[in-house]
Image (spheres, rainbow, N blue to C red):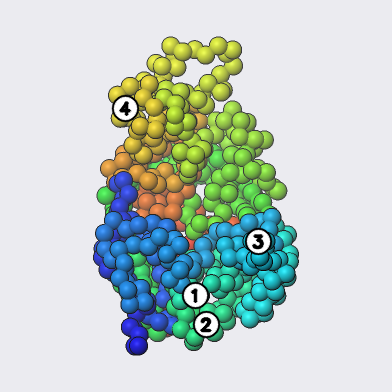
Amino acid sequence: MGRYENILTTTKLCKNYPGVRALDSVDFDLRYGEVHALVGQNGAGKSTLIEIIAGSIHPDSGSISFDKDSYVSFDPWQSIALGIQTVHQENQLVEELTVAENMYLYDLPTRKGGIVHYGDCIQRASQLMKDLGMDIKPEKRVANLSFVKKKLISIAKAFTRPLKLLILDEPTASLDGHGKDILFRVIKEHKVRGLSVIYISHNLYEIFEICDRVTVLKDGKKVATHKVKDVSMRDVVRNMIGSSQSTLYRRDKGVSPPPGTEVLEVEKYSRKDVVHNVSFQVRKGEIFGLAGLVGSGRTELARLIFGLDPKDSGRLLYNGQEITPKNSYDAIRKGIGYLTEDRKGDGLLLSRPVVENASLVALAKDKNVFLPLPRERRDVNTISKQLNIKTPTIEQLVINLSGGNQQKVVIAKWLLAASEILIIDEPTVGVDVGAKVEIYRMIDELARQRKSIIMISSDNPELEAVCDRVGVMRNGELVTVLEGDEVTEENILHHTIGVFDEMEVK
């Protein structure tokens, strides 16, 4: 019985979410015994594609062919039964169990009566670890192991079942040099035996080291597929940048304040293994962007500045006076606002009305024993009109608003609290294009009101269109600050992934 050249083919896969086309008619193919890289900026559609292949998401349309058979979609257990395993960027391990128990969690060896045969479990795990060249004791509790060993266990776990296709999502993000060597050796050994691998990484150097082909996604569409040996790193970066939807809006940056008017100083913020000695200034009336990959330390830095997490070092100064918050309440009292990335989980009370959500922080700062209800309603009505929050009444439950209007309620909350310093984390995630433009204009208006704004975003075109300057974080460090004509999508991407034009790979 002959084999097809491709073990996997997707045809015109589409996946839509409210206001967002995550995948737009994507064709993708993977050959037997091939390591195929999947690259693209944040939001390009990589995660959606692999989750469809893993069975966690069902496409709206399109088809999948795997190992000669055709499917409309997979369910997770069906995907696993077919021989597809996914190692996610975040470890999905049970910390309180041993290495062996984690590896065989869904297929524990048992004796008669269904009692787990722990000795057999240890023996199997030990043999597999030996075969993979991983020196990790199977009886060790996972909670006591390093991040590197946890990642290696996640990789080893994929080999406890029959395996035809291995999906690796940013596998080296938490590996050291030795761990990376182990992973690459495992990939090369099993590739020869026919294993196919989809390899997702922002580290383009790895793509050229381990992969046979590379497919680039952007804005949910496939841009190109190249043989790695026939393309340069510069070509791949150009494909990743392409043309962008975010050019629908471009802020007039001519109104930004001149150099030398810094009023907010972030000075030497550090936390072990997360943020390393980060310093920068934000001028009054300026939008200062923070770029970087997931895990680069952007959100962790914001939480340190706002006093949510403990820091090892760092000071915050405003107009020459130290205002370093002791905690988040102290930050609010000192005029700092933090619009978190997870507006539904951290920023809003979804089951409460607009009026309560918008006034929540202002009321927390109010020293009055009784709530000034008439003033509360008046202020919320005023700010709702200013921000054009589309709601029939301020008594409307926030859960019934669109994503864009929910985000406006979060902004209203901090404006009513008289925040002069605003940290805005991923302001347009999950909102449609029209709402994005409204939010950009709103942030611009806040800058015109002389607020000091730190804006974190994974959308590089968004940073280019909106920000006066952009600091780029990588591995917990602020590696550069771009300003003026330097603030381009291409420059941001180069510094984000640490790839520059002169460093071509053929």
Instruction: Measure the C-alpha gap from mark 3 to mark 4.
Output: 60 Å
Residue 143 location in percent, x, y?
70, 57
Q: What element carries label 4?
A: loop
Q: Residue at left 42%, top 58%?
A: 56
Instruction: Kindly check if marks 2 and 3 are in contact, taking CB atoms under 8 A apart as contact.
Output: no
Q: Residue at left 53%, top 72%?
A: 161
Instruction: Say the numbered circle drawn on residue 391.
Output: 4
- Please tell me which residue lies in front, 24 or 378: 24
Residue tagged by mark 3?
A: 113
- Counting residues from the start of the chain, the first of labels 3 and 4 encountered is 3
Q: Residue at left 58%, top 76%?
A: 183
Residue tagged by mark 1?
A: 163
Instruction: Kindly check if marks 2 and 1 are in contact, taking CB atoms under 8 A apart as contact.
Output: yes
Which mark lies nearer to you, 3 or 1? 3
**Kind of residue indicated by mark 2:** His
**Kind of residue indicated by mark 4:** Thr
- Counting residues from the start of the chain, the first of labels 2 and 3 encountered is 3
**Kind of residue indicated by mark 3:** Gly
| Label 4 CA crowd tier, 10 Å (few <14, some 14–19, many 20+) | some
Instruction: Kindly check if marks 3 and 1 are in contact, taking CB atoms under 8 A apart as contact.
Output: no
